[in-house]
Image: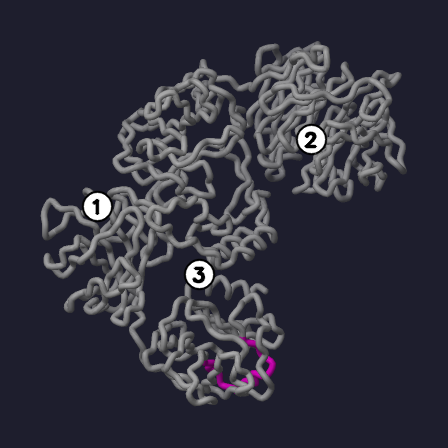
Amino acid sequence: MGLDILKMLTCASCGLVSLQAMAEGLPSLVINEFMASNDFAVEDFDVPGEFDDWFEIYNQGTVAVDMSGMYVTDDLAELDMWQLPDGIVIQPGEFLVFWADRQMEQGPMHVDFKLSAGGEEVVLVMPDAVTIIDQVVFGQQTTDFSKGRNPDGSEFWNYYILSTPGQTNADGIVDYRLYVNEIMPENISTLEDPDQPGDFPDWIELYNASDETIDLGGLTLSNDESMPDMHVIPDGLVLPPFEYTIFILDGSPRQGPTHVGFTLEATRDFIGVFDPEGEIISSHQWTRAVPADVSLARVPDATTTWITLTQPTPGSENILPSAGEYDAIRINEVMARNESTIEDPDEPHAFEDWIEIHNTGEKALDLSGLFLTDNPGVPDKWAFPPRTTIKPGGFLVIWADDDPEQGPLHTNFKLSSSGETVAMYLSDAVTVVDSMPFAQQFNDISYGLVENDSTLNYAFMSVPTPGQPNSSSTSIIVLPEWTAGPEFDGFEIVFQEPNELGFDDSGRLWAGDVDDMNMKIFDVDGSLIGKVGGMGSDPGNFILAPTGKSGPEAIRYDGNGRMFVVDRGGDRVNVYDSQTFEVIGSYQPIGVTLIDPTGLAIDSQGLIYIADQGNDQIHRLLYTGNDLKWLSTFQPDNNGSPVLNKTETLALDESRDILYASSETNHTVEAYQLSSGAYLGVNVTEQQSEPPGSSQPGEDQTYKLEPGRVGKDVEGVCVMPSRDILLISDEENGRINIHSLCGDDIFNPDNAYGWMGSFGSLGTDPGQLLSADGIAADDTLQLIAVADQANARIQAFSVQSINIPINLSTCPGDLDGNSRVDGKDLATLLGQWNWMAPPPPAEGEVVDPDVYFNIADINRSGNVDGTDLAIILGFWGDCPCQVTE
């Protein structure tokens, strides 16, 4: 399998390449020559008067090879397309010709497929129908021209006017290593016409990537592929090895030998250099407008990767721009729900989304040709127009209104108020200048960078400042509080003791109230939209236990439209429809008796883990749709491991096979292997009860807030997979501790158990927590909700507003965003194999630019090929976990 993938990769990424059998034991056979469009060039050896497609096999080895049972095919997805009959033996140095005519009755050398002149592959396969001996992938072919290796069996190919089927290949048409290397379709000031001072015409650069001088005389240039001879390069022009030459495309060939009789269109066009027979040597086509004084260039030279250069390099090496020169550029502030803050200057009475760019440096910067996007998967979505500069310390407001015709600073996209990422790229559409991810946004509240204590942090701003410095006095870090609500069902909903929280699949927050014995349901904007439960024994209600330990205790979504909630007093689990809020049922597990259940977690397979506090056990359960069935009991042995002691809350990190359990008695969060129950370690412990030099426990506030430790109660534990973090509520100290799940520090007390920081403090102001109880996180909204029980409220914090480093697990090839490059990503890529961007639209045709994007086109080359496969294989496995400020 590895050899096959390597061959696919090399052939797809190199255009037309044939790999010789390199693994030990494979025969030394190569596909040596072929003709995919045979009108009158080569007559069928077996049937005079017929002119069929053909390919030639060459034995470059020293022993005869029996080809009986081998396969040939023109489709990599069907390696067993045609099996060669018995008796075909190829001698050392011999050439055998096979006719691709689907007329097998004509003889054993006739196969069951034809070749496509438009391009495809020819593959020779071992009798196992798996192992590829050799393959050739080719593009558009010219009628009555063959293509063959020169010399035989080598990796170098020539076109042949006089084909040589069954014979050694002679010298064919020159295989030029000549490239259209850089293109300037709208020259305003970059390169002056040397023969006409003051003029700045279009130009192209040709590059000789070979070690031999190329005679350009007789070659042609054209901006129309169907008319290759629009301009014939005069005799006498030569290009030395590894040198560049410039042709002036001004429509005035009489001015000199390097002046061409046509011009280019910046909006979309084509340029090609052709051989004397009209075959393309090198070309490029563009379908999006290129800004003035911005060139299209291969970087590096002579490769297949095209980028735009804001600093063109005519006559010299094309160099990838450096992000360093734009280090001073910041995406400084965005507003995705502009209802009344600032009016669009180009459309009165319109209030559009906007993005503010800030130059923090001491010199003006030209942004022309750089890209701005709201989708990193389409980095070149909108280009800054020509002569867009931003002065030192200046601000530039861009209107994200999807109305580019309104003016040069209006983009072709809008912002999503539910959250997305705004990013700025260099002209290569690869290198990131800056980016700003944001979550749910709110009316007339902007989001941006605010400086506090000399540190830049993301924050919401109640007073937006487009075109001006952001003020820390305008920032808020807390989204609307969920406290007292409106009239509902005839009485006012007021939180008494909010405790447990959970998000459903729509980003709605389900909040338990242990005093009211019910749950309130809030929409993403903080508005109350429903309630479920109440005191009683009916299904969906909560039973009051004699011990007083009652009410909704854990709230989790199962991924299938259901919310599961522990009814602690009833020793059962209530299940609700997450969309209608209707009760599905209340269940006591079959096969085990719960005593004082508390924590609950649900894995991606639907298995339910429930903390049975009365028995100091954790059970695995299965919901069948009609009942809960006991599967097994998760009870670590006591061989050096702490006994489960009054487990309060459960959380899962499936990617690392870990279950986290907070202990009410031990005042710890303990980690166990999810699959086996083996104890792994403690990843947070209680602060020491009595700080040094103190006679009263907890008297020293500095010691009380020791990094990585908690007060006496750990009420909430939550894993946030998108950030690779563990959130732990420290009730006594009124804060949320954040621990990194990257690396091994999560179990290392010397490094504070991977502690990254905390947010919240004791108090009643917004953002403060008088007590931190239940906690929930939503990966889509990037929100962290905390039950502030003593303040009778719930507060929601934006992840980007928290003043701590945040983990990110990303790498090229992770197509589904699960922080792994795995078989799913490979399947996605192979499902899109050979995808190519559609042809450019006709003049005046409106086409969605996203049709030119394919997620499997990782390197954004315009087609899904071996280079993308190489990226997948190169990053196989878990994405590296990084910490970013």
- Residue 69: in magenta span: yes
- Mark 3: which secondary structure? helix
The one nearer the camera, 538 or 548, is 538
Location of the N terminus (image quadrant): bottom right
Q: Position of residue 421 (x, y in %)?
A: 48, 34
Judging by the rendered image, the residue that carries numbered circle 1 is 187
Query: What type is the residue that disc 3 sits on?
Result: Ser
474 shown above or below 592: above
Q: Residues within 10 Å of mark 3 (few under 14, many from 20)?
A: some
Q: Position of residue 267 (x, y in %)?
A: 30, 46
Tag in front: 2 or 1: 2
Q: Earlier in the sequence, mark 3 or mark 1?
A: 3
What secondary structure is found at the residue carrying circle 2? loop
Q: Secondary structure at mark 1?
A: loop
Q: Which mark is residue 579?
A: 2
Label 3, on which residue?
13
Q: Quadrant of residue 208?
A: bottom left
Taking depth in this image into account, of 5 and 756 the one nearest to the observer is 5
Label located before the other in sequence (2 or 1): 1
